[in-house]
Image (cartoon, rainbow, N blue to C red):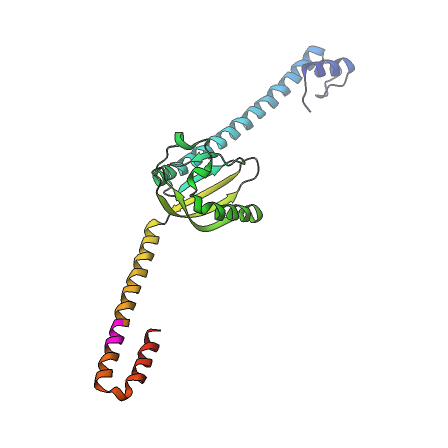
Amino acid sequence: EELTVEDVLNDCRAGKSAVSPAPTMREEDILNEYAGLLVAKLAEKITALERANRQLEYSEHRFRTILEISVDAIISVDSERKITVWSTGAEHLFGYTKEDVIGQSVELLIPEQERATAKKMMDEMNRKGFVRNWETQRLSKDGQSVDVEMTVTNLGAEIGTAAIVRDISKRKQAEKERQRNFETLQKAFEGTIQAMALTVDRRDPYTAGHQRRVAELAIA
């Protein structure tokens, strides 16, 4: 309960001093005692407030540092799907500056063909509180699709959602290259088997049917 000067005067007049004054203490002495208590309480509150402010400043500094140095994009969106946080990594990944996107709808990053999937993922996030390692595509400023992996967390109605977005374009390209190499090798292998079967056909027509069947099973 806050203690006011008026309370102090009323206590003194009623003989209810919180500092338990001696019977011979004058009202002025009692007021001085109360003033000392008030100053001490005020100093304590100021110290606590300064400590809280320092902790807040440190947390904000740490958060800003993470936003600046993180290679991955860090994006936060409010309950109206408006972008509120846009990290340096997001600038590098998508090509938009903070000035370009803060306050804009996050829909500008979502390709038309990905919007139905995005809606399902958001429903899952709202149900579970998060979605991890979601592979999808997003649009850069130049209109190009970017392969990304996202982890999205629900931070509550007042804050919205936060997403960590990682560029996986190189990994996807490597996967496509491996698939192309596999298909090329498979075709070469099929061609080799078929050539061997034809050779056998010419040399031994009696076993040609059997050899063709073996060849078909080998490339199946």
Nearest the eye: 178 or 203:
203
Tell me which corner region of the image, top left, top right, bottom left or bottom right, holds residue 191.
Answer: bottom left
Q: Is residue 180 above or below residue 85?
A: below
Name the quarter where the N terminus is drawn: top right
Give the side of residue 93 with respect to residue 104, left or right: left
Report whether residue 66 is seen: yes
Report whether residue 24 is seen: no
Nearest the eye: 148 or 156:
148
Count the marks: 0
Nearest the eye: 64 or 132:
132
Residue positioned 53% across, 30% down in the render: 52
Q: Which residues are magenta?
A: 191-195
Does the magenta run of residues contain 46? no
Residue positioned 53% across, 38% down in the render: 160
Tell me which corner region of the image, top left, top right, bottom left or bottom right, holds residue 204.
Answer: bottom left
Instruction: Find residue 182 and report its horizontal and vertical position in percent.
Output: 30, 64
Name the quarter where the C terminus is drawn: bottom left
Nearest the eye: 114 or 122:
114
Give the side of residue 145 with respect to residue 78, left or right: left
Residue positioned 33% across, 38% down in the render: 142
Instruction: Find residue 80 and report its horizontal and vertical position in percent.
Output: 53, 35
> Which secondary structure class fits the magenta region best?
helix
Give the side of residue 171 with respect to residue 197, left or right: right
Residue positioned 44% across, 47% down in the render: 113
Q: Is residue 198 above or below residue 155?
A: below
Instruction: Find residue 63 and report its horizontal and vertical position in percent.
Output: 44, 36
Instruction: Find residue 97 and report its horizontal and vertical position in percent.
Output: 37, 33
- Outermost residue on the bottom side: it is 206
